[in-house]
Image (cartoon, grey):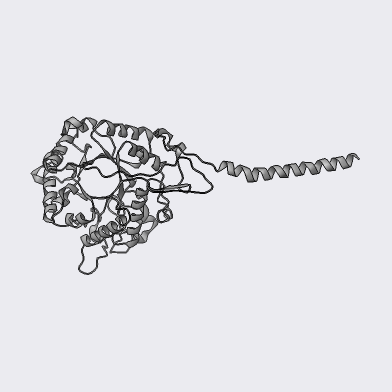
Amino acid sequence: MQRNTFIKFFIYTILTIFLCGLFVYYLLPKIGNQVEYNSEETNLKNDQALSVPNTEVLATSDTVSVAESAPVINPIVVTHIATPKEVKAVYISAWVAGSAKFRDSIIKMIDDTELNAIVIDVKDSTGRVSFEMPDPNIVKYGSIEKRIPNIRLLTDILHKKNIYIIGRVAVFQDPYMTKKMPSWAITKKSDGTVWKDHKGLSFLDPANKEVHDYIVSVAKGAYEEGFDEINFDYIRYPSDGNIKDINYHLATGETRSDNIEKFFKYLNGEVKKEKNIPMSADLFGLTTEATDDMGIGQVWEKAYPYFDFLCPMVYPSHYPPGHMGYKNPNAYPYEVINQALIGAIKKTDKIAGDKNKIRPWLQDFDLGITYDKAMVQKEFKAVYDNGLKSWMLWDPANKYTPSALQLETTQ
């Protein structure tokens, strides 16, 4: 009798455990899959907690696609703002953009000054993409390094402050992708191996169609995450190293600048064809005065038709000794930038262009000469004296001079 009771107890116990297992298996995953997001959150310090994987939410300016198993409350919908008539921007790296403490200080500076725009690295000259993008043409190469944990939260915060967001894409200098895809790289004429400059840096081949498509994917991916404009940098051949050993892959009768112009044309057609995404191009400062391509393939007149804005990097520190007769051009910011912009306007006028497309990069960094409030404002004066209104300010350390940016001091 006792033996039968024990057997019944054993069977009931096994059934109970089995039923509990079914309950856990079918019900708990449904509970665990529910995710909530708060689009009203504006505290930059909560980035990690609010990070949204791209596999769960893919937001555009028009729609939000949500995985069926992950219902979302108040998702962050990507928006865009129109290009201001006068763009006054500062650059920050992706690392700074991803740090709440540092970018808070930059945003406060924008709030407190005449600044109305910010330039953030989407893909820098290391070749790494700064945040998650769902495009398989990017994901498959492993170039994404999540330096900005929640890009949609950041672009949402900036747009709520009416800050125009420019995404910087370093195009051809790319040591990551040249290692990942050596067939995409600029190669040596001598032995066909990957060419490198004196610093050991390698470049993607401007004539390679796969490179073109990859860059287009990065540009479109940034726009889909909330960037208002894409700024293309390093759109050139290398400037240093054993240039004579570069295989430029030139067709008969074509030049380096022809290859670069083909890229510009393709970029314009692909990036703009659906949503007319604003585009700007960074050019060497000397392109405004040079009569050739300076060995890098950049010609002002060949870039102008394909971009909404041309951004000559007229940093006085980057002009060679003897330029304009100055032993150290860096000590003469007004004079150097004034002449550069006069040249840019002349070249633009010759092709019946609009000088308002000229938006120079200026410097707010020290390189042998201290750039304080007075020096930075001399640069602004050179811009305004040429009838231009827009500029972008560069400091690789992202440490700017707020006193130079006050509204009342630059009018």
Residue 147: tell me if it is visible: no
Residue 110 sits in quarter: top left
Q: Quadrant of the N terminus?
A: top right
Compared with 342, 258 (above or below) is below
- Left or right: 366 with respect to 216? left
Q: Which residue is at the front of the view, 131 or 84?
A: 84
Q: Locate residue 208, reporting x and y percent.
A: 31, 62
For image coordinates 42% across by 35% down, the residue present is 41
Residue 216 in sight in this render: yes
Does residue 161 appear left or right of residue 375 in this picture?
right
- Above or below, 209 against 312 in this view is below
What is the residue that sits farthest to the right in this orientation?
1
The residue shown at (13%, 56%) is 351
Splitting the image into 4 quarters, where does residue 330 fall? top left
Question: x, y (%) of residue 289?
Answer: 13, 51
Judge by depth and name the residue closer to the eye, 406 or 188.
Answer: 406
Q: In this view, does 218 lie to the left or right of 282?
A: right
Q: In which quarter of the image is the C terminus?
A: top left
Image coordinates of residue 36 in percent, x first then y, are 49, 39
